[in-house]
Amino acid sequence: MSPVFPMLTVLTMFYYICLRRRARTATRGEMMNSHRTIESNSRTSPLNAEVVQYAKEVVDFSSHYGSENSMSYTMWNLAGVPNVFPSSGDFTQTAVFRTYGTWWDQCPSASLPFKRTPPNFQSQDYVELTFEQQVYPTAVHVLETYHPGAVIRILACSANPYSPNPPTEVRWEILWSERPTKLNASQARQFKPCIKQINFPTNLIRLEVNSSLLDYYTELDAVVLHGVKDKPVLSLKTSLIDMNDIEDDAYEEKDGCGMDNLNKKFSSAVLREGPNNGYFDKLPYELIQLILNHLTLPDLCRLAQTCKLLSQHCCDPLQYIHLNLQPYWAKLDDTSLEFLQSRCTLVQWLNLSWTGNRGFISVAGFSRFLKVCGSELVRLELSCSHFLNETCLEVISEMCPNLQALNLSSCDKLPPQAFNHIAKLCSLKRLVLYRTKVEQTALLSILNFCSELQHLSLGSCVMIEDYDVIASMIGAKCKKLRTLDLWRCKNITENGIAELASGCPFLEELDLGWCPTLQSSTGCFTRLARQLPHLQKLFLTANRSVCDTDIEELACNCTRLQQLDILGTRMVSPASLRKLLESCKDLSLLDVSFCSQIDNRAVLELNASFPKVFIKKSFTQ
């Protein structure tokens, strides 16, 4: 045999060993590149033509800037072909989320963050889109028209929303993810991340966003899904690289949805007998508990399988006082809750936001968990938890007598009668009902019995018939109220404002954005300024009647003001804004977008005089 062939064999083996070593020691960026190599080398049959399609429908989302009864600035604008792209600027025909930057985290209404949130989970909002045909994705393009850069994760789901038969299994796979990054440009762009290949077809795509680094609201115009009908075949060369990446599960664990094999990790595994516990048994119990308190939940599950001593510590209910399950929404199910149950008997803060959708968590599973773990609950986050029904709220009201904070934001599938049960939670201090179907009768009952409320969010609650009646009850019963969100309440008038101002003198935050029935000529804004001296945040967004007199009253009476939004007014001049900025030394955010008397030159002059204030001036190309 020729000596060439043994030499080739040796070189091949050496190359293979190098690939394996590289895969095991690669950084996250190198692993991403190897995945991209796989995608770029995938082979498709000439007959397997690429399908390009725009979103057919928006099926779920966490928040939007727009109202529930129109199309302006709503997530529903993501369906269909582009309305604006390639133009740049602030357009009502785009999809806009409710918040941007860190301003909402700096408000009096901001909640404290949960401990043990994994550092790779930084999603703040999401939107889910369906497409006509199921395909194996080859590309996902996002058309961003204003302040791009918010999208940080793109996921695909195996379930077909249009199938008449329920799926036997629902899987979510991350196509692409990255940490939040700040882009210097606010211009439109077609975002084309390099996605990884998955082994199932999909017509359900989810975008997750983080707007914390943005200077203003991000605006999305359309989403384009590229894909093929038949599963692509990988070449031999790239399959070796892919195999090694899969062997090192660190990449999947970092960028995956977390708790793969969650139930297995929580189950009582048989522990190996060892000669000792690595000297951990020499440490005080409390010190070990303190050390373990820095681990994420999946790490805690893994550590519990190493030895009996650490298993005892990892299963101690004191490790689960604060339990944040939102990062694991794609995996969490009834079985997960069942395994967690014995460990969570002392849980005080529980975050189940985004979880349980598409049958992952049942009403029975949720009820069983709360009956065991609800007695000590003080805070319960259930934003966008669409498995909830009236029975769930009844269980919460019965099993959580100490509950002080309840978040039902965007639980828009809850029936109106379900909210009656909240009135039994008399210790509530924080209640978030944004984008829910709460009705006036139920809300009046809640306000009557929950007199300890300090934070109340009623933004975009379209089922309330008369906000003046609600405002009157708030003023009469909720004397300790510090923050109130009435964003897009459709019919509050100066009468309701008068009741609020006289009955809630400790208000520090008030959002009256997009409340069209309030008119400055009635003196309502002057009354607010004079009777609420503790105001730190005031949003009067899109109220065209706000005038110089109102701004001057704020300057005289609300010197603690930190955030003011008067977007869209025609009646405010640069002179009154200068008075405000001179009086309110703590002012950090001032939005004067679309204020006809405040041009770019005036903004530049105010910026020069008050460099610590972020003055926002949006534009339309």
Image (tube, rainbow, N blue to C red):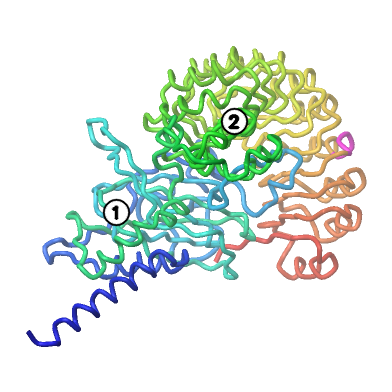
Relative height, residue 37 to residue 123 (above, below): below
Q: Position of residue 71 (x, y in %)?
A: 47, 44
Left or right of 440 in this view: 429: right
Mark 2 highlights which residue? 350
Q: Secondary structure at mark 1?
A: loop
Amino acid of disc 2: Leu
Relative height, residue 619 to residue 326 (above, below): below
Relative height, residue 229 to residue 607 (above, below): above
Give the image quarter of residue 116: top right
Question: Callout 1: 10 Å neighbours few (<14), some, many (20+)?
Answer: some
Q: Position of residue 145 (x, y in %)?
A: 49, 62
Q: Magenta residues: mostly which secondary structure?
A: helix
Closest to the observer, 497 or 302? 302
Amino acid of disc 1: Ile
Mark 1 highlights which residue? 198
Q: Which residues are magenta?
A: 529-533
